[in-house]
Amino acid sequence: MSTTAGRSVALVTLGCTRNEVDSEELAGRLAAEGWLLVDDADEADVAVVNTCGFVEQAKKDSIDVLLEASARKGQGRTRAVVAVGCLAERYGKDLAAELPEADAVLGFDSYADMSSHLRAVLDGHPPTAHTPSDRRRLLPLSPVDRQAGASAVALPGHGVAFDPSSAPEAEAPSGGPVPASGPRVVRARLDAGPWAPLKIASGCDRRCAFCAIPMFRGAFVSRRPHDILAEARWLAERGVRELFLVSENSTSYGKDLGDLALLEKLLPELASVEGIERVRVSYLQPAEIRPSLLDAMASVPGVVPYFDLSFQHASAPLLRSMRRFGGREAFLDLLAQVRERAPRAGVRSNVIVGFPGETDADLDELEAFLVAARLDVVGVFGYSDEDGTEAEGYDGKLSSDEVAQRVSRFTSLVEELTAQRAEERVGEVVDVLVEELPGPGTEDELVVGRAAHQGPDVDGVTLLDPADWPGIAVGQLVSARVTRTDGIDLLAEPA
């Protein structure tokens, strides 16, 4: 304990909500070892940057943050900057060689002993940079054989039991004394908001031609239900009212535990956790959707009818080239099944334009789908080569200018379509989770919340006039009627 006494660390998280879970697990491990967690990287001895390595822009953003943090070393308290996360795992030694400003580049295998690594960095003995490998090879090919060996493989965000004998004077990651018995969650909240991501699985077994995630996140592994439920209870005790279930592919949950319908069985248990008002599922693969999952997501009390469907495109031939399944008619049929069960369901998706070989006919098919689909939110991404992926070797590459033009065209289209979809909700009564109140002296500002069809951060918000809601509080769930819209954002009054 003496080696970490008085030493502080800040975690800077980039990328997706899965990374947020990983950062909170790292924070829990470090807090248990006596590190002081601080919010401002300039006020920490070590700034740990949890990077994103998904697409080219995300990589650039991660490197920019690392360089910016390194440039401030010596100007404040910060003495070291350490890169972790997907970019560090994916490139390891190459990243360290090209970015000497970072004091260490650590992969997922370092997470369990992050305290020792950070101490070594501060003591002038940084560990050797991580050597990347294809993490799909770390576990058996057959999903049902994976759980036996999963405990020996680093799975960020899955947590392990906190062992008080390893640090008897430490506090538990929750900030309280180590409990004598019962579940010990390896996590420390870095955000006091009323919702939190909860990881149900890691890795992916799909082989999409454009995606490198399986190579650095590994094969698909489900967390066991009792671990997920223990963490859900822990989050609820700390004021969380909405659980946001995250993974690389939630529709595969349970396949390595011998029960592909396990998610449907888990949802009612999560929704029944005391203090939890809403459960939201993310990252669904259209090709793996089954009627029983649709039924559960549309009918279990407390589970919001929110469908995060990864369509990626709508042209069947192009989807085959992407190593994916489906097409316009199949996707519209799936949406019809969703809305038959839950007419007001929220649906979001992402699409890629500019994929090698994409034709005008493919774009027309995508446009026809988007017009007919009435999606609440659509993310539009331009294709870029990703190291080690199948599509990197494809012919028919488009110029960066052409890709940018297609992104611009479809971004404009979906902004118009999603604004129209929001207008369809005028008059609806929605349950709004209150997330943010106006600060003192800001009489003109509005209360910020989210309706059931709005996922965290990227799906728009619902705005309320505080004059209509005396005594309203963060974490409260209120019933409101939508009166007008601003893009995908809703404005609502008491129902």
Image (spheres, grey):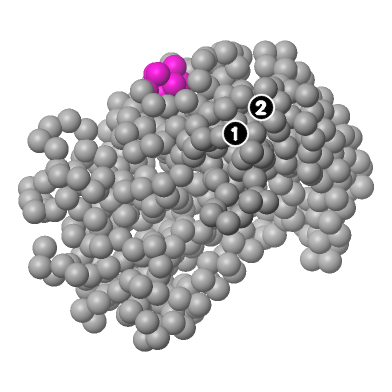
Q: Is residue 175 visible?
A: yes
Question: Looking at the figure, which quarter contains the N terminus?
Answer: bottom left
| Residue drawn at point x = 22 percent, y = 73 percent | 120
Whether residue 271 is in magenta: the answer is: yes
Q: Which disc number belongs to residue 494?
A: 2
| Residue drawn at point x = 47 percent, y = 25 percent | 277
**Secondary structure under the numbered disc 1 in the rendered image:** loop
Stretch in magenta = 267-273
Question: Looking at the figure, which quarter contains the C terminus?
Answer: top right
Image: 418 above or below 411: above
Image: 480 above or below 475: above
**Toward the viewer: 326 or 104?**
104
Q: Is residue 309 visible?
A: no
| Residue tagged 1 | 469
Image: 46 above or below 367: below
Q: Amino acid at mark 2?
A: Pro
